[in-house]
Structure formats: structure tokens, C-alpha cells
């Protein structure tokens, strides 16, 4: 029992560390576009996101229930023996999270967690212990549908935003009002992030407590101290700031104008909040990226860097199997070596995290240089100075050209008529002079 208690403590500590990495990994989801457009300063944006992540963690527990009472079939496992498997799954998730953070790749912390748990469970228990129906309906399908849906919504909202304010088409800075709107929409994204991502760590800790017999399986909601711990940890992680990923998502994906940022954040927030209500464990990163791409396509003259999109998509595809593979290896050590396997996993995890952190210091990214490319280019505006005309503008231009042609034709006709009149008058005077002479 003492061993089980120690493992539970390790699982809680590791889960909270994952929650912390989730916070700094996903800071960019809410704050990349307002920083890119100049709506918020980097440190102010991150502080705002941290506070709203903290509040959002208290608004819903549906996603937590998906993890603690959804993907694992508790009647197919031995509860106490499953605790080291949860530990191994968290190691897989954290390792992948740290690696993608080092590379500045906005992969999904959510899918890293699910991949780690699924891989470890398959090796440490059996594939039968996974409820693949729940995994498909609440993890895989939302992962495929949500980014596309968010992109479509952002595309439409961007089109509408520019259609409503088309009178500013000739004034590139005439839509600065959207900068103030971005403060609200980015705050809504940070709040939504708290309602979805913080719940995942709550679900893991609740699952560990149930396996150890410290919480009844009939109690689906996480305990209050679990909610508090996860909310505070993800807020601290968010305040630390994922500057590498902010630079990739805010600048590398597309050149964001204020109206585009407003549209992308509106789409991201609405998609995540709706999914949290239904208990879908979404990837906030994927939804935010899909929204940014959609808003980029909705702006005339904007340039979407499809090579960067492809690199991010590879990260999406690899996250589940990669984290699952690491989780499976960690679980394999537990199965082979028992308690020694747990210790070896812990030592390896600390070593890997420390090595990645030390490596990251060689090319540190902070609040001072996270958006350096944006600052140099002037509030991240890198769109065509004279974007192609809209259909309405083309129609108006054709109408104006037709009117100018008609006016020119009338002037030519008038000049011709006057010339003919003068000719007739001259002829008449000549005839009269001739008759007078006769």
C-alpha cells in the first residue's frame, strides 16, 4: 500500500508538471495573433492568458470525465497495478511535449497525453482496456473535424469583416478598431483553453485516485483540491510563456492583420467552448492553427506559408503515435522490472527534460525577441499593398469606366455638332456675301 501511495504521489507530481508544460506550450494558441498584430504586448498578453486560464479551469469538468471515466475500461484492469501505467503514459506525453517545445512545433499537448496513456495501457494492460469507441468519437474525430471547422468559420468571419468595412480598402490602417476587439476575443480563447486543457490533467489525477481507491469510481467530478492544483499550475505555465511557439504560429504561418486576428480568435473560442460543453477533448493548438489558416485565406492579398502548414500538420499526425511509442517503452520497463522500472523511468524522464531545457538555452526565445520578425516588418503586416479588387470594386470600376466613356462620347458628339453648326453658319455667310456681290 505504501508503494501504491508513493506511485500516486509521483503520478500527481508528473501530471502537474505536464499541466505546466501544457500551459507554456499552448500560450500561443490565445496570444500569438494579438501579439502579431500589435493589439497586446507580449508580457501583457501572457499575463492576461494566465489569469483567464485559471478562471476557465473552474467552468467545466466534462473533459475531465472523458479521461477519468471514458477512454480506460476500468473493469478490464487491476486498479493498483494500473498506477505505474499511468505514470509511464505521462512520461510519454511530457517527453513529446518538451521535444516539440524545443523545436517550436505547435503540436497537440492533448494528443500527447492521450497517445502516452493509450500506448502505455496497450503494453502494460492490454488493448482491450482501451475503449476505442470513446477514443474515436471524443478524440480522433474532433481532431479531424475541429481544425477544418474552425478554419471555415474563420474564413467566413474574415470575409464578412472585410465586407462590412470595405470602405477602408484604400487605407491599410483603417481597420485598427479590430485591435481592440482582439483583446476580447483573445481573452475568450484563453478562457476556453482553461475549460478544455486544464480538465485533461484533472482527469488523469482523478483516474489515479480512483485506481488507488482514494476516490469512488461513482464520483465523476474531480475533487476541489485537484481543480485548484491544476488551475494554478496551468496558469503558471502559461505565464512562463511559450515564446518559441508564439513566433511560429503568429508569424510563421501567415501575416496576420487585425481583422484576421479577430476572426481567427472568434472561431477558435467558439469551437473550443462548444467542444468543452460536449466533453470533446480537443487540441487547442490544432483549432487555433486551423483558424489562423482560414483567416489567412479569407484576406485578399494575404500569403499563407503552406510549407509551414505542412510542417505543422506533420506534427499533428505524429503526436499520437510518437507519444504512444514513448509511453509504451516506459510501460515496458515497468512490466519487465517492476518498481525498478518506475525508478528508471523517472530518472530517464528527468534526464531528458533537463537535456532539452539545457539545449533550449543555446537559442533562447523570450518576451524580448519572440516577435522580432514582426517588430521589424511593422506590426506583422506583410500583405499585398494593393490587394486585388473585390467583385463590387470591379463592378464599380467598370461602371465608372462606362460613364467616362459615355461622357467622352457626348463631348465628342457635342463638339462635332458645334463644328457642323459653325460650318453651316460660315457657308451661309459665304452664300449671303456672294448674293450681295451679284
Image: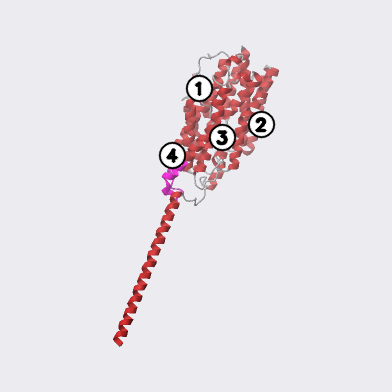
Residue tagged 1: 227
Counting residues from the start of the chain, the first of labels 1 and 2 encountered is: 1
Magenta highlight range = 157-180
> Does 360 sit left or right of 190 as displayed?
right
Viewer-side label of 4, 3? 4
Q: Of circles 2 and 3, which is in front?
A: 3
Name the one closer to the observer, 353 or 204.
204
Q: Nearer the viewer, residue 168 or 97?
A: 168
**Circle 2 residues within 10 Å: few <14, some 14–19, many ≥20:** few
Check residue 355 in the rendering and tell me which mark sits there, or answer none: 2
Upstream in the sequence, badge 2 or badge 4? 4
Q: From the image, which quarter does the C terminus lie in?
A: bottom left
Percent position of residue 114, x then y: 59, 25
Of labels 2 and 4, the one closer to you: 4
Q: Secondary structure at mark 4?
A: helix
Q: Main secondary structure of the magenta part?
A: helix
Q: State which mark lies toward you, 1 or 2.
A: 1
Image position of 277 with respect to 2: above or below: below
Determine the residue positioned at 38% across, 62% down: 407
Q: Which residue is mark 4?
A: 181
Identify the residue under disc 3: 242
Amino acid at each position: 500500500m505504501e508503494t501504491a501511495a508513493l506511485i500516486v504521489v509521483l503520478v500527481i507530481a508528473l501530471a502537474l508538471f505536464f499541466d505546466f508544460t501544457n500551459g507554456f506550450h499552448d500560450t500561443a494558441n490565445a496570444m500569438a495573433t494579438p501579439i502579431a498584430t500589435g493589439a497586446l504586448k507580449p508580457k501583457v498578453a501572457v499575463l492576461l492568458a494566465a489569469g483567464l486560464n485559471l478562471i476557465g479551469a473552474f467552468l467545466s469538468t466534462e473533459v475531465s470525465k472523458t479521461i477519468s471515466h471514458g477512454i480506460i475500461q476500468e473493469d478490464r484492469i487491476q486498479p493498483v497495478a494500473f498506477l505505474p501505467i499511468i505514470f509511464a503514459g505521462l512520461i510519454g506525453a511530457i517527453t513529446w511535449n518538451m521535444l516539440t517545445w524545443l523545436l517550436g512545433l505547435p503540436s497537440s499537448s492533448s494528443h500527447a497525453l492521450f497517445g502516452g496513456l493509450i500506448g502505455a495501457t496497450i503494453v502494460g494492460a492490454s488493448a482491450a482496456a482501451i475503449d476505442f469507441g470513446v477514443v474515436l468519437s471524443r478524440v480522433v474525430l474532433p481532431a479531424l473535424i475541429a481544425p477544418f471547422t474552425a478554419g471555415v468559420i474563420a474564413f467566413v468571419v474574415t470575409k464578412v469583416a472585410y465586407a462590412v468595412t470595405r470602405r477602408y480598402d484604400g487605407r491599410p490602417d483603417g481597420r485598427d478598431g479590430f485591435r481592440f476587439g482582439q483583446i476580447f476575443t483573445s481573452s475568450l480563447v484563453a478562457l476556453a483553453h482553461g475549460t478544455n486543457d486544464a480538465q485533461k490533467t484533472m482527469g488523469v489525477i482523478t483516474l489515479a485516485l480512483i485506481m488507488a481507491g482514494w476516490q469512488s469510481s461513482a464520483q465523476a467530478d474531480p475533487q476541489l483540491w485537484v481543480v485548484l492544483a491544476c488551475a494554478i499550475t496551468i496558469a503558471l505555465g502559461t505565464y512562463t510563456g511559450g515564446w518559441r511557439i508564439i513566433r511560429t504560429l503568429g508569424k510563421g504561418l501567415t501575416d496576420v492583420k487585425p481583422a484576421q486576428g479577430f476572426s481567427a480568435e472568434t472561431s477558435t473560442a467558439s469551437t473550443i467552448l462548444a467542444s468543452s460543453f460536449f466533453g470533446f477533448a480537443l487540441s487547442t493548438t490544432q483549432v487555433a492553427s486551423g483558424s489562423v489558416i482560414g483567416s489567412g485565406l479569407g484576406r485578399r492579398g494575404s500569403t499563407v506559408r503552406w510549407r509551414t502548414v505542412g510542417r505543422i500538420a506533420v506534427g499533428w499526425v505524429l503526436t499520437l503515435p510518437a507519444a504512444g511509442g514513448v509511453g509504451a517503452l516506459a510501460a515496458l520497463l515497468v512490466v519487465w522490472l517492476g518498481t525498478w522500472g518506475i525508478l528508471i523511468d523517472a530518472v530517464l524522464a528527468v534526464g531528458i527534460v533537463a537535456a532539452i531545457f539545457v539545449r533550449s538555452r543555446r537559442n533562447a526565445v523570450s518576451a524580448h525577441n519572440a516577435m522580432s520578425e514582426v517588430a521589424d516588418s511593422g506590426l506583422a503586416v506583410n500583405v499585398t499593398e494593393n490587394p486585388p479588387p473585390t467583385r463590387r470594386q470591379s463592378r464599380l470600376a467598370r461602371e465608372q469606366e462606362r460613364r467616362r466613356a459615355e461622357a467622352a462620347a457626348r463631348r465628342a458628339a457635342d463638339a462635332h455638332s458645334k463644328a457642323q453648326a459653325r460650318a453651316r453658319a460660315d457657308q451661309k455667310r459665304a452664300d449671303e456675301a456672294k448674293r450681295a456681290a451679284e
